[in-house]
Amino acid sequence: MALPLTFNIALFYTLFVVLFTDVVFCNNGRRVGDVMDTEFGGFSVPLEHSFEVDDVAQFRVRGALVLKAGREPSVALTQNQLSEEDRAKLKEVAAVDGLYRIRVPRVLLQADRQTERQLEGYLTAFVRACAMVESHLSDVISLHTDVSGYLIGVSIVTLPGACRGTEVEDEVDLEVFNTTLSVMGPVNAPGPETALFLERMEMETEKKGKNPQEQKSFFAKYWYLILGGAIFLVVSSAAQPPAGGGSEQS
Amino acid sequence: MAKLIWLCLNFVILCSTVGAVFEDQVGKFDWRQQYVGKVLFSNFDAQSQSSKKVIVATENNVFASLNIRTGELFWRHVDAIGPEGKIDALLHHGQDALLVVGDGRLLRSWEINIGGLNWEIVLDSGSFQSACLIGQQDIVKHVAVLKKTAISLHYLSNGHQKWIENLPESETVDYQSVYSGGNGEVYVLGIVPHSHIAIVVYSLDDGEIIRQFSVEAPWLSNIQASCAVIGEGMLTCADSATVSLYMLDLESQTEMSQIPLQSLGLEVTPGFQPVLRSTQPNAARPPLSEFFLQVGPEQHLLLQLNDGQIVTLRDFNPALLVSFATTGEKTIAAVMSPKNTTACSVNLFSAETGRRLLDTTLIFPLDPNGGKPEELYVQAFLKKDDSVGYRIMVQTEDHTLTFIQQPGRVMWTREEALSDVVTMEMVDLPLTGTQAELEGEFGKKAAIQDGLFSMVLKRLSSQLILLQAWISHLWKLFYDARKPRSQVKNEVTIENLSRDEFNLQKMMVMVTASGKLFGIDSKTGTIVWRHYLDNIPANAAFKLMVQRTTAHFPHPPQCTLLIKDKDTGLATLHVFNPIFGKKSHVTPPAMPQPILQSLMLPVMDQDYAKVLLLVDDQYKVSAFPSTKNVLQQLQEIASTIFFYLVDSSQGRLSGYRLRTDLSTELIWEVVVPTEVQKIVSVKGKRPNEHVHSQGRVMGDRSVLYKYLNPNLLAVVTESTDTHPERSFMGILLIDGVTGRIIHEAVQRKAKGPVHIVHSENWVVYEYWSTKSRRNEFSVIELYEGTELYNSTVFSSLDRPHAPQVLQQSYIFPSSISTMEATLTEKGITSRHLLIGLPSGGILSLPKMFLDPRRPEIVTEQSREENLIPYAPELLIRSEWFINYNQTVTRVRGIYTAPSGLESTCLVVAYGLDIYQTRVYPSKQFDVLKDDYDYMLISSVLLALFFATMISKRLAEVKLLNRAWR
């Protein structure tokens, strides 16, 4: 994500110009997705963060999220480095086990016009400031959208996530964010898998049909057992009368 | 072939895991109680003195017949829930009872002896107003049903319609009442509020309008509330503004005559709307000329209309309730008046003269834990000496029915509040007195405080007590043994309630919608205590919490009931002892602010009461109990206390963290736009749930670890678009501490009602598939993978990797009413889902069938793992019904509680009925069977023992002999 950053910035800036100048943009509502895909449109919202010793949130801009709508929404992030002052503060906050919070405005990814995109309010998430420090600012931010493309939640975790109390000596480690960013929509929950089951059933019956041994009737299959049983019965019944007679005689 | 055998084996194993009930076990571990609900209409079967039925129609759309000797149900008919099955009117004639159901949709006639349906007809549409029986020449043959725009007459014998007539000017006139005095005319009384009364008289024979006139009555707004027909067609209305009665002869006059009550020497309590109550014992004859006039909350007058003049027969002051009753040709008036704080007295008076009948006093005991009497139903009968005897059924505010015989013997009571249980908990019973004594003796505190000598004394005294208890137990055994078995009763009282060996008997604390609390012994279903809270708002929400269990002797157990008014959000707390039902002396905090959320912490104060946190609408937190100790503890752990709030109207889920000064800070926010979907339910895990195994052993002997996040919330949303093609339901799994969305799935072409169970590492939900038009189950399971991130402790703040999510769906052949999972002490026993079906069955479905790892293609590994091959349909096997033929009508909730035995889970299903049983999801692996042959095993053991002894001896002798040789 970090590699093509400069390229991305350049690309998106040009795209902004295209998008904003493109005022009389016409499409018939049905093919929004298609058009957006080909147009490769995107828009930017601020990503803000806050870390204060007294835990009263004061959000400042951390970077800009460039969201691209479409069937497969994607996101890119441009963010500033932490200043000297901020680094010191972050370490201070981490020392008192404060929180590092982020927030993004609520937006609708799928809308055509800027005015429709923005909704009232923010989505916030947090991570312990010490985890942020100890992971050397490597965080994973995911944005969650709902079915219709509304941003419904944001989450942040650091890697590694634990606070072990290890001191971060090198100031340089706290300069650049190493952010992994993703945007996730809801997955489609599976319904009952009837087709495959039926197919399997069919295959099994077919297999049975192919195997001639399986198709034999009960008698055809077990004739030797039945015959054996019958012989045994006959023999035993034939053997009994003399024995019985013998016992009667004695 | 191998596959087939494998399948067969599987089925054998699976079927055998569910132990069905043997015939001789019926009712041994389970019981059922059937209820009818709050009574709306009630009639005694007045055929003869020996009749023992009372028929009731209730708010819960139930029509039933009760045995007046025992209070048990003869029969019961349960109609559809809601307005569709609402019983509008109950008319009783001879052996038939007529019901108008569903706002005048149906007219039904029931045979009341066996509860069979005589006939049923569908009435023309229109909202129902009134119904009455119509007779002529002393024979009642018809019933008239008045609707908003039409009146119809039906034969009693077969329900066929005799005639139907549209009402004139029905757009302006509000027809409210129908009356017939048995003279071949049917009077329909309508009103234009604050203007005039409109009266239409129909001929009984052909429905022709005989007369039609209107009378000025600008003061009248509602006929049914303030008017009654008295005597020979005299419409009498009471008006509180002018404090007078208005009378109108329906046959001749065209103007109402005003009779000021003052002229009769009567006064009305200011602000009280006088109420008239008349009686028409026989529908073929006009009503009696005697009637009751209620002039104050506790004052009734018995008046008589005599040649157009009103005469006061008797003044009843104070009188709580009055009622008329007729037997043979005699009509009597029963009056209930307060006697003292603990009882009311009921007396009979002759309706004609107002004289008190001798020897008719009956005492009605007022339950201090019950409500005030609300309605009085009287059954009068003629004794052999022609005097009048009677029994009464009293309905109180707490929906209790009490049936009393002279002189005050309570025959039975029915707690109909239990037909509407809202929430419940099961609490362990306390130890017996002797056990508690021992506990107290060896308690830690005691040992430190006392010296050696007093300890010895204590030991001796407690041993004496034990001896005494043992002797009395022996004596009781001996005493009972002499009596025939049928007479030995094991009455359950508070005194002999104690915990049994395996903690199978518990106290069920039930909270009902009417605000009455019950303590029920789970073994027998006996109501041990009841307590009526009389200031409950109509739309209250209840949350019951156990703050202190019975484990902390000598501190009494403590339950807290949070009662919240849904409109204002204002809440009150009721703190009580769940074993005795007594209100605790602990004063709950006053809560002037609306309460948003409550949460029970595992933190305890010095008296072992768990701390309850209440969050108000200013996001301030108050603790209960709020002692210094508690506040100090809270300060220490404040930064680890997180809670979440759900605002479904805005689709907002937000997380907060507690600060040391008991204020809160917002730490995360998730917003689900309400334009697209709305949050319908949020479900966490049960705090008392244990999971025994951390993972599952796979076919290749590796372990798949479960994702056991105790803070995980399952959020269910439904789309606002209800079109079958576009509707969907969403399921969000959110960590309640960090607000992280763990999983987000959407089930397309599905809609609610969604039932969901969330436990261990799985979520099971049921929905309606609009595409396939069937009910479907879906299961989500979460796994960490083959390696645990941190095996010692789970922290939501430090679990960066998202879990693996597996999901599978199945077809279920029935709709469901409610769903719950079994719960056992240590979580070793496999889990079952208990599903309440609308048919009244409770299905115990092994969770094994709802496993997303069920393979579609069977492999060696899946076989090794004991996974059942995937089949899209979940079958309902009849042996899975845990309530065999004990139908639980309209089941609304299932409560599960662990017992002291790992194999056993206690189950209570409640709805209109209450059913309690035990289930053994993995069979009774830790219990010997009922028919276990102790004699055989012990005799074999003994025999073997002796055999060894003897053979040893013999061997010794033999050896000795050999040595001598």
Image (spheres, coloured by chain):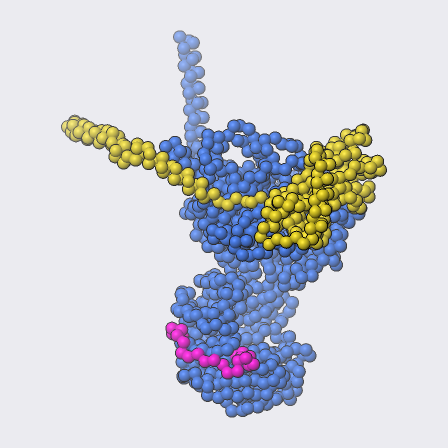
Chain colours: A yellow, B blue
B138 lies left or right of A190: left
Is residue B157 covered in magenta? Answer: yes
Image coordinates of residue B835 in percent, x first then y, are 50, 49
Where residue B959 appears, x then y in whole percent?
A: 42, 13
Q: Does the magenta stretch include residue B902?
A: no
Which residue is more in the foreground, B237 or A50?
Answer: A50
The residue located at (51%, 73%) in the rendering is: B127
Q: How many marks?
A: 0
The foreground one among B495 and B235 is B235
Residue found at the very far top of the displayed protein: B965
Q: In which quarter of the image is the N terminus of chain A?
A: top right
Q: Quadrant of residue A83?
A: top right
Asked if residue B490 is positioned above or below residue B850 in the image, the reply reads: below
> Which is more toward the observer, B322 or B417?
B417
Eyeballing the image, is B752 above or below B121? above
**Residue B95 % position (x, y):** 41, 71
The quadrant where residue B383 appears: bottom left
Q: Which residue is drawn at 42% across and 24% down?
A: B947
- Residue drawn at point x = 45 percent, y = 80 percent: B165
Tell me what residue is drawn at x 53 percent, y 88 percent: B213
x and y, in percent, of residue B628 in the image: 78, 47
The front one of B790 and B466 is B790
Res. B487 visible in picture: no
Quarter of the image with the C terminus of chain A is top left
Residue B396 makes an appearance in the image? yes
Name the residue at the right extreme: A85
Magenta span:
B156-177
